[in-house]
């Protein structure tokens, strides 16, 4: 696929991935996760699986998949479990709650989730701390097939990149998962994508 534009999903152009822990855990850095368990959202999540998992693997850590929170983890490895291994109705707030309650030792979320009270309630946030954060990456991308005619691609770019300039366009964008606008990728966004590619391949190759 070919990247056409960047989408400001739910009003956000970029975000980062976070690994956080309960303050009572005594874990202060990634080394402290050895023998412990991290909760990822699901195998298709960029911010709550691919980015944190690839970062851990690229730093030389061994990841060990478990199916339940009580399953033992090798002392020299970092255990990981997906939210839907614990509950079919798992979501971002579930990950926050599980780390808070000690069901897992750490969790992975996006910076957007961390700042959203619906995903990270203000009643438990002070009890949690971030121990790792990724580089920012584009929140969402608009992709097209590579053999699409150039004229059609240009038309799509024109329509989408100017939609936020009219009331009618804003209404349509908002109906699509509260999109704020579409714009062209900045040099830093393109660099972030290139930096992420080899990391994502690490996950595909090793897990």
Image (tube, rainbow, N blue to C red):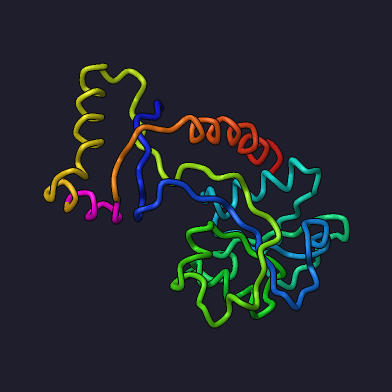
In the image, residue 176 lies in the stretch drawn in magenta: yes
Q: Residue furthest left?
A: 168
Q: In the image shown, does 65 or 149 lie closer to the viewer?
A: 149
* Quadrant in the picture for residue 20: bottom right
Q: Residue furthest bottom?
A: 123
In the image, residue 198 lies in the stretch drawn in magenta: no
* Quadrant in the picture for residue 39: bottom right
Q: Residue furthest right?
A: 75
Query: Residue 8, percent across and down?
Result: 35, 47
* Residue at x 35% of width, y 36% of height: 142
Q: In the image shown, does 119 or 63 lie closer to the viewer?
A: 119
* Residue at x 26% of width, y 17% of height: 150
* Residue at x 65% of width, y 78% of height: 127
| 98 sits to left or right of 71 | left
Query: Residue 147, percent across and down?
Result: 32, 18
| 198 sits to left or right of 92 | right
Quadrant placement of the N terminus: top left
Q: Is residue 155 above or below residue 35?
A: above
Marks counted in the figure total: 0
* Residue at x 39% of width, y 39% of height: 141
Q: Is residue 134 above or below residue 31?
A: above
Question: Magenta stretch?
Answer: 172-179
Query: Residue 177, percent across and down?
Result: 30, 55
Quadrant placement of the C terminus: top right
Q: In the image shown, does 177 or 82 lie closer to the viewer?
A: 177
Q: Is residue 201 above or below residue 83?
A: above
Q: Is residue 158 above or below residue 107?
A: above
Query: Residue 173, percent across and down?
Result: 23, 49
């Amino acid at each position: 696929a070919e990247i056409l534009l960047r989408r400001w999903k739910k009003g956000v152009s970029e975000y980062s991935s976070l690994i956080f822990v309960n303050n009572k855990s005594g874990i202060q850095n990634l080394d402290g996760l050895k023998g412990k368990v991290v909760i990822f959202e699901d195998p298709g999540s960029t911010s709550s699986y691919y980015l944190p998992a690839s970062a851990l693997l690229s730093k030389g850590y061994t990841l060990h998949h478990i199916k339940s929170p009580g399953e033992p983890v090798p002392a020299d490895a970092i255990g990981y479990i997906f939210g839907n291994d614990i509950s079919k109705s798992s979501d971002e707030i579930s990950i926050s709650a599980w780390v808070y309650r000690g069901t897992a030792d750490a969790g992975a979320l996006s910076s957007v989730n961390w700042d959203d009270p619906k995903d990270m309630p203000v009643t438990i946030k002070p009890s949690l701390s971030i121990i790792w954060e990724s580089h920012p990456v584009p929140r969402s991308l608009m992709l097209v097939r590579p053999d699409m005619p150039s004229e059609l691609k240009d038309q799509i770019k024109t329509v989408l990149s100017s939609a936020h300039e009219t009331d009618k366009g804003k209404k349509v964008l908002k109906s699509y998962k509260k999109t704020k606008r579409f714009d062209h990728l900045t040099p830093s966004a393109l660099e972030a994508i290139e930096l992420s590619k080899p990391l994502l391949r690490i996950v595909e190759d090793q897990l």
